[in-house]
Image (tube, helix red, strand yellow):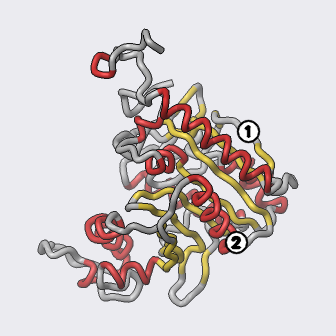
């Protein structure tokens, strides 16, 4: 490597991660594969190009060759589970249009796995075991979304009056209960996220609001919540897990609602993946699943400041055509 350019004079073609970091990355991925091999979880590879999507309000897949690049391998992996694959995992690329920054990239690496006939609690324990296998974790804290809000924000996102959720800046708006999701989301960014960033613990949040269900089952409560969890470390979201929704009618309605909200936000609607809904219809078993942002985990494990420092090449344009 004596002919490598000096760091301060790297040309545009040069990797964004150091060669030493890329070696550490390769070793970490090898350890992940060993982790799942010991647990007899099958590694799979599914297409990254799809003719249809699983519409979400806040995530847009890049258009490509008359279809879309996946934001997650979720629908294809669930089709494998419905076909009887048993427990499976996948390490591969995912894409989000218009996402770029210290913690975002238009193409990134996702580690996703599914455990048929497991509970959400069993999957949470496995996520903790995996992370502890890969890096030093000072402690683990598990609490509900509601408990975190009461502790660090001082209000209950489900039960507090709307006035308690309005930021101190006076607003010439008469809020209604339908505005609660917007107010909670705004206060989450302004008040809760900064508090969580100061924590030196692996934080597992459970019991998210029913208006943020993703593809998770709902628990009637009280209060009603989505059966999902998020894993955060130093304020960085690492993983998102679900007790997977199995009802194709409810799932279709969520896709329709997501497209409606996309229209409200000025975004194009997305075609619905009918093959996925048919798999749910034909018999998707009880299942828990989780998606983990591998680049983010490696960024924290290697004490780097940005995703680009753990990727071979970092894109210079946030949204690419195809």
Q: Is residue 63 visible?
A: yes
Q: Position of residue 205 (x, y in %)?
A: 49, 72
The answer to which of marks 1 and 2 sits earlier in the sequence is 1
Crowd tier of the residue under label 2, counting other residues whose Cα lies within 10 Å: few below 14, some 14–19, many 20 or above: few
Residue at 50%, 46% in the rendered image: 298
| Residue lying furthest right | 84
Q: Position of residue 226 (x, y in %)?
A: 56, 74
Residue at 54%, 54% in the rendered image: 135
Mark 2 highlights which residue?
Answer: 122
- Of helix, strand and loop, which one carries label 2? helix
Q: Position of residue 153 (x, y in %)?
A: 30, 79
Horizontal side of 117 relative to 52 (left or right) equals right
Horizontal side of 234 relative to 297 (left or right) equals left
Q: Is residue 1 above or below residue 300?
A: above
In the rendering, which numbered label is found on residue 45?
A: 1
From the viewer's side, name the closer residue of 239 and 140. 140
Q: Position of residue 122 (x, y in %)?
A: 70, 71
From the viewer's side, name the closer residue of 203 and 8. 8
Residue at 30%, 88% in the rendered image: 161
The reply to whether callout 1 and callout 2 are in contact (CB within 8 Å) is no
Horizontal side of 157 relative to 288 (left or right) equals left
Instruction: Specify the quadrant of the image occupied by residue 227.
Output: bottom right
């Amino acid at each position: 490597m004596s002919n490598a350019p000096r760091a301060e004079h790297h040309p545009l073609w040069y990797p964004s991660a150091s060669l030493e970091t890329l070696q550490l990355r390769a070793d970490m991925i090898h350890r992940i594969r060993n982790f799942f091999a010991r647990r007899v979880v099958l590694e799979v590879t599914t297409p990254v190009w799809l003719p249809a999507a699983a519409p979400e309000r806040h995530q847009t897949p890049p258009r490509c060759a008359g279809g879309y690049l996946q934001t997650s391998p979720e629908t294809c992996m669930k089709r494998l589970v419905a076909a009887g694959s048993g427990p499976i995992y996948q390490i591969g690329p995912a894409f989000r249009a218009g996402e770029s920054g210290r913690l975002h990239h238009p193409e990134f690496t996702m580690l996703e796995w599914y455990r048929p006939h497991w509970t959400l609690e069993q999957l949470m324990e496995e996520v903790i075991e995996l992370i502890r296998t890969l890096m030093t974790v000072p402690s683990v804290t598990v609490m509900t979304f509601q408990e975190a809000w009461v502790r660090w924000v001082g209000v209950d996102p489900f039960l507090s009056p709307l006035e308690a959720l309005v930021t101190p800046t006076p607003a010439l708006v008469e809020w209604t209960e339908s505005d609660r999701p917007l107010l909670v989301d705004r206060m989450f960014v302004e008040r809760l996220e900064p508090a969580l960033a100061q924590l030196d613990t692996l934080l597992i949040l459970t019991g998210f609001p029913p208006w943020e269900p993703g593809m998770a089952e709902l628990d009637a409560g009280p209060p009603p919540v989505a059966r999902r969890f998020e894993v955060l470390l130093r304020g960085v979201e690492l993983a998102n897990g679900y007790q997977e929704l199995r009802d194709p009618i409810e799932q279709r309605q969520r896709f329709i609602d997501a497209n409606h909200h996309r229209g409200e936000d000025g975004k194009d609607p997305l075609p619905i993946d009918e093959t996925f809904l048919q798999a749910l219809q034909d018999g998707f078993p009880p299942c828990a699943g989780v998606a983990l942002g591998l680049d983010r985990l490696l960024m924290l494990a290697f004490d780097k400041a940005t995703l680009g420092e753990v990727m071979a090449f970092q894109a210079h344009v946030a949204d690419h055509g195809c």
